[in-house]
Image (tube, rainbow, N blue to C red):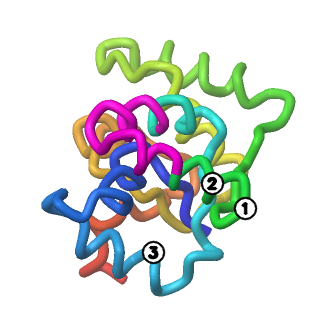
């Protein structure tokens, strides 16, 4: 299971993004392994609309509605866990989205987190020590 952060999903959707080829290959290996946390959806929607346009936004929303991606809607305790992560790593200024992704990855015992945000995810000690992809691809 790979829990997906905003940047990795944007790289998948944007063919002009530098990391698109490696993220696309990672996704195509097993798309059913990818889990989108609820918290990234509004952020991805906004950034797709702003940077890729209305057609890309419509395609993304259609894919979500057609269940092309698995979405994890959260459980009781996820927000409290995210708050604790934000408090513990206050100096990083993680924010709700990153903390929710981390909390969800911990709860689901994810094998990996797809993220391009190594400044935040690389600095946090994540329970279960999931790989950070694509960074850790060579460590497979």
Distance from label 2 to label 1 (Cα)?
6 Å
State the residue lying farthest toward the front: 55
**For the residues carrying marks 2 and 3, which lies nearer the camera in this image?**
2
- Residue named by callout 2: 62
**For the residues carrying marks 3 and 1, which lies nearer the camera in this image?**
1
Nearest to N terminus: mark 3 or mark 1:
3
Residue 113, given in percent of the width and then of the height, sits at 47, 57
Q: Are marks 3 and 1 in contact (CB under 8 Å)?
A: no
Question: In screen coordinates, is 51 left or right of 86?
Answer: left
Q: Quadrant of the C terminus?
A: bottom left
Say what secondary structure mark 1 lies in: loop
The stretch of residues the image draws in magenta is 45-58
Instruction: Tell me if residue 95 comes above or below residue 59 in the rendering.
Output: above
Say what secondary structure mark 3 lies in: helix
The residue at the point 50 percent across, 13 percent down is: 87
Q: Give the numbered dot on residue 66.
A: 1
In reply to whether residue 55 is colored magenta, the answer given is yes
- Residue named by callout 3: 27
The residue at the point 31 percent across, 31 percent down is: 50
Magenta span: chief secondary structure: helix
Q: Are marks 2 and 1 in contact (CB under 8 Å)?
A: yes
């Amino acid at each position: 299971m790979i829990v997906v952060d905003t940047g990795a999903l944007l790289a998948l959707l944007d063919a002009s993004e530098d990391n698109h080829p490696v993220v696309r290959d990672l996704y195509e290996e097993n798309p059913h392994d990818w889990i989108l946390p609820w918290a990234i959806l509004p952020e991805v929607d906004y950034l797709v609309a702003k940077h890729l346009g209305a057609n890309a936004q419509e395609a993304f929303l259609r894919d979500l509605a057609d269940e092309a991606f698995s979405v994890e809607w959260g459980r009781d305790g996820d927000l409290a866990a995210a708050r604790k992560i934000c408090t513990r790593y206050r100096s990083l200024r993680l924010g709700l989205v990153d903390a929710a992704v981390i909390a969800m990855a911990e709860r689901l015992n994810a094998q990996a987190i797809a993220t391009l945000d190594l400044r935040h995810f690389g600095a946090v000690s994540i329970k279960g020590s999931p790989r950070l992809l694509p960074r850790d691809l060579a460590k497979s």
